[in-house]
Amino acid sequence: MQWTYVAYFFGGVFLVNAVPHFTNGVSGRRFPTPFAVPLGKGQSSPTVNVLWGTFNLVVGSLLVGRVGEFHMNRTSEILAVGVGGLLMAVMLARLFERICGRQLGGEAADRGRSAHDAHE
């Protein structure tokens, strides 16, 4: 029973990780993947991102849909998927901010500050 929740947690992780890769890929944009060179700095082609996003979607779906008997009306099961997804989302936001922000350079940072200053 406990291993089922671990599977659901990682299912949420994989499902959330599918989103940025798949959406950037189908939008024709390069985006970082674990296959980029140099690792942690480079970006992969849109095709690689579509494939990586699809792989994550399949693994996440299998972990949630095929391990145990997942029920949408069981709060504990929804929480396991949700916590995994939320933690992955926060981690990805920080990672991609660092990678993509560095690649965009100072211009993007200046725009961000200008927009932030305008709201204050």
Image (cartoon, rainbow, N blue to C red):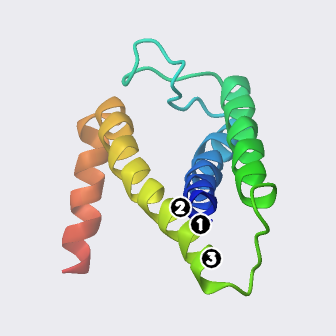
Quadrant of the rendered image containing residue 11: bottom right
Residue that sits furthest to the front in the current view: 1
Residue of label 1: 81
Q: Single out the mark in the foreground, 1 or 2.
A: 1
Which quarter shows the C terminus?
bottom left
Task: Quadrant for residue 51, please give it.
Answer: top right
Q: CA distance from mark 3 to mark 2?
A: 10 Å
Q: Is residue 85 above or below residue 109?
A: below
Q: Does dot 3 land on a helix, a strand or a loop? A: helix
Residue 34 lies, with reference to residue 54, above or below; the image says above
**Position in image of residue 18 (x %, y %):** 65, 46
Q: What residue is rendered at 71% in x and 52% in y?
A: 63
**For marks 3 and 2 on the same chain, the one whose residue lies earlier in the sequence:** 3
Label 3 is placed on what type of residue?
Answer: Ile
Q: Are marks 3 and 2 in contact (CB under 8 Å)?
A: no
Left or right side of 93 for 73: right
Q: Which mark is residue 85?
A: 2
Reply above or below: 4 against 99. Answer: below
Q: Nearer the viewer, mark 3 or mark 2?
A: 3
Residue 79 vs 30, above or below: the answer is below
Q: 72 or 111, which is in the foreground?
A: 72
Residue depicted at 46% across the width and 54% down the height: 88
